Amino acid sequence: QEISGGYCFFHGEVMPLDDANVNISTHALNYGTGCFEGIRAYWNGETEQLYILKGIEHYRRFLNSCRILRIECPYTAQELLDWTVQVLKKNAYREDVYIRPLAYKASRVIKVTLSGLRDEVAIFTVAMGDYVKTENLSAVVSNWQRIADNIIPSRAKVTGAYINAALANDAATADGYDEALMLSVDGQVSEASSSNFFIVRDGTLITTPVTSDILEGVTRRAILQLANELGIPSEVRAIDRTELYISDEIFLAGTGAQIASITSVDHRTIGNGSTGPITKTLQDVYYRAVRGQDERYLDWVSPVY
Ligand code: PMP
């Protein structure tokens, strides 16, 4: 279903989404010279409140992506969050929402460069139904490699870089898998097609370091914090492909994926084939925290209304 109707932020103001259009000669459309974010807002039906999850953290990463791409964003993280609140209020959602900030090279020129171009910042939002699969995903190690930081900056959320994720994901789903795990050019596991990932070995939670060509995930950081506070030992280190096969648990971590258990990789069953106990413990805390239902993590969320 195509996104239409409602309001967005474009050209410095809140305006109807259906009027927020760009020309086919726009630099970003031709060369992928943009960056974006994916943020969730969660509806709490009990208190009738809408909460943005980790808005400032996402907008800080957004500004870092802009810096890497030489995009000048005229707003601070707080100002971007304030515009987001205005858009959400205008759209008056009473369900979960996905928020998509976008910054891009808006000039209408043929020139392969990042400099001397006009930049534009926009934010649109879309209601997101309850359901994404969070249990028992099957994964394949993709033969598409994860982009390396000195090929396309992997720690920036670059528009054009998602062709890499799309190729991996498209191939994985065509072959009947739910998700693709991607190796870096040096052959170690980097991350999934659009989320970070964790494995559990002998009770220790393990994820790859920020120098493994990953996107520096907001959810990844939140999970490391939870593990620390729940007394689950954790390690941040490189992960080999065959460690996947002998892991007790594997799960995806991302704004879109949330915490989603992977119970098979390359046709090997992980653990006993269902969501493992550490994954379950983290899910239980996470899914309450994101809706403002856990007092310990109220600083993760900011209320819209
Ligand atoms: N890696 C990639 C390539 C992604 O697109 C995402 C989703 N933004 C993530 C990791 C997870 O990041 P986050 O937890 O901040 O959503």
Image (spheres, rainbow, N blue to C red):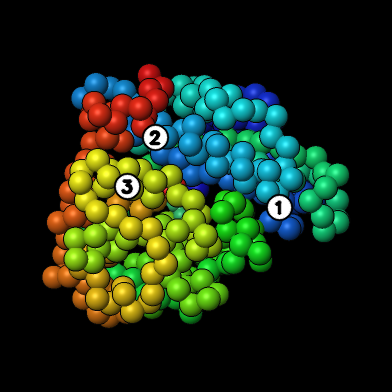
Q: Which of marks 2 and 3 is nearer the N terminus?
A: 2
Around disc 2, counting alpha carbons within 10 Å, would you say few (fewer than 14), some (14 to 19), or many (20 or more)?
A: many
In this view, the residue in front, 235 or 85, is: 235
Near mark 3 (Cα within 10 A), the count class, few <14, some 14-19 or many ≥20, is: many
- Secondary-structure class at tag 1: loop
Residue at horizontal 74%, vertical 45%? Answer: 70
The Cα atoms of the two marked residues, 3 and 1, are separated by: 31 Å
Front: mark 2 or 3: 3
**Residue type at numbered disc 1:** Thr
Which label sits in the foreground, 3 or 1?
3
For marks 3 and 1 on the same chain, the one whose residue lies earlier in the sequence:
1
Q: Which amino acid does label 2 sit on?
A: Leu
Q: Percent x, y for residue 302?
A: 39, 25
Which numbered tag is attached to residue 101?
A: none
Per the model, the C-alpha gap separating discs 1 and 2 is 27 Å
Rendered position, 9 above or below 153:
above
N-terminal of the pair, mark 1 or mark 2, is 1
Q: In the rendered image, which residue does mark 1 sit on?
A: 33
Q: Do labels 1 and 2 touch, CB within 8 Å?
A: no
In front of the other: 269 or 203: 203
Residue, disc 2: 53
Residue at the location (22% across, 51% down)? 232
Expressed as whole percent of the image width and height from the top left, the position of residue 275 reads 18, 60
Q: Does the rendering let one see residue 148?
A: yes
| Along the viewing direction, whichever of 289 and 101 lies nearer the viewer | 289
Left or right, 74 with respect to 87, comes to right
Q: Distance between the residues labelled 2 and 3?
A: 14 Å
Could you tell me which secondary element the residue under label 2 belongs to? strand
Q: Total number of numbered labels?
A: 3
Position of the C terminus, as image quadrant, is top left
Q: Which mark is residue 223?
A: 3
Kind of residue sitting beneath label 3: Ile
